[in-house]
Amino acid sequence: MTRDEQPIQADLILTGASQVVPFSDLPHGAVGEAVAEGTVRDGAVACRDGRIVFVGTAAACRREVELKDGGEEMDCAGQVILPGLIDAHTHLPFAGERAAEFRLRLAGKSYEEIAAAGGGILATVSATRAATDDELLIGCRTRMDRMLAFGVTTAEAKSGYGLSRDQELRLLRVVARAHDGHPLDLVPTLLAAHVLPPEFKDRRDAYVDLIIREIIPAAAREKLARFCDVFIEDGAFNAAEARAILMAARGAGMGLRVHVDQLTAGGGAELAAELGAASADHLEHVSREGMRALAAAGTVAVLLPAVDLFLRKTAYPPVAALLAAGVDVALATDCNPGSCMTENLPLAASLACLTTGLDTDDALAGITARAARSLRLEDRGTLELGSAADLAVFAVADRAAILYHFGINHCRTVVKNGKLVVRDGIPD
Ligand code: NIG
Ligand code: FE
């Protein structure tokens, strides 16, 4: 700042951080080097009116930033500041639990066998349909509180355990209510095409028709869903059905994200790319052609490493090949009662590193900047002037330790829209 320049006014300053990691200006594909280069040591971040107004060294902050009357300065005491974390794939609204299935899997039964025997997604559909709105709301809020404590400030939330017009719309309305007044932002996704509901057992075409003619238009009219998703898999929906549903959703103004190539290779990544999907999720069995298509279309790969562990599957997504092909890779929990019962996003990132060899800086970008991109959120996921003042502060000196010391919650402080919402590990 030169002598006659005005200081930057701030209402919240976080200073004394060992590292501030902005994740800005990342190239496509691997980002490790760019993340390291952009990291500010002995750093500070200042916010005003819910936006970031300064990112730099603590020394520069002292020179250039002035705290407004009534503002707060917090000493981060050698901790690491990241953008608020973003969980780009969750099945947030549901009722019941499936611990008995967990035990069956430990005894050697597969996810597919359990589903074929009447368990799986349909077990949660029954429990969810039987739950009241308030019970579903409390379930969402409980999970959101846990996510926030891990440093997550935005999460995607899919319907998909209702599987009728009224039940799917009900779940999306619960998501809207859960979002309202909670510090965690939710991005709602319609997943009416999760599996075929029992009432339509021998009438696949009729259910696909119902989604296209009734559920998508109704969700669009009420502005209940920003995205539409389809589970493309044997036992769920095939590529032709998915194409028809996704084209209808696109026509209704929704963005697209898809569950693809999880249990079997089905050309799902190619379809996601062809339709201009924002994300293609899972991808354990993605083909070479699929990777090239995702890179060319700018479709983000959202990998869900905790699912592989939870389902005891060892076919991991080909992360190195995806990055080498120039695909942007995000990571998410897939928080749901069947294939991944956890809200711990940093744990999912640790597991990506451990199972696939993903570098820690790529993994941290996967739960910040890349996750934001997969949700088409341009105002967050990075620490840049003007972006949302969503921050997560971790009690480690080096960012890699967030993932290295795994399974632990290192997050002590969370800022959402410029307000401290978790202070010293305690929700405000
Ligand atoms: O993303 N793949 C489909 N849906 C979930 C599993 C849901 C469940 O088992 O309840 C998933 O893995
Ligand atoms: Fe999922």
Image (cartoon, rainbow, N blue to C red):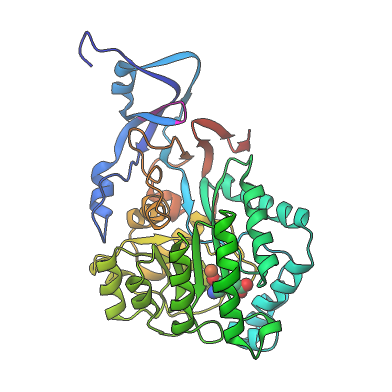
Question: Residue 158: in sight, yes or no?
Answer: no
Q: From which residue to which does the magenta span run? A: 44-50
**In the figure, residue 356 lies in which quadrant?**
bottom left
Q: Quadrant of the N terminus?
A: top left
Question: Residue 137: in sight, yes or no?
Answer: yes
User: In the image as oriented, which residue stretches furthest toward the bottom?
Assistant: 202
Q: Main secondary structure of the magenta part?
A: strand
State the count of labels.
0
Q: Residue at x 50, y 65 (%)?
A: 228
Q: Position of residue 46 (x, y in %)?
A: 40, 27
Q: Position of residue 131 (x, y in %)?
A: 78, 63
**In the figure, residue 224 lies in which quadrant?**
bottom right
Q: Position of residue 404 (x, y in %)?
A: 43, 55
Q: Residue at x 59, y 38 (%)?
A: 425
Q: Position of residue 171 (x, y in %)?
A: 66, 60
Placement of 159 over or under 142, stated as above or below: below
Name the one closer to the observer, 102 or 372: 372
Placement of 347 over or under 201, stated as above or below: above
User: In the image as oriented, which residue stretches furthest toward the left?
Assistant: 2
Q: Is residue 162 left or right of residue 49?
A: right
Q: Residue at x 43, y 37 (%)?
A: 388
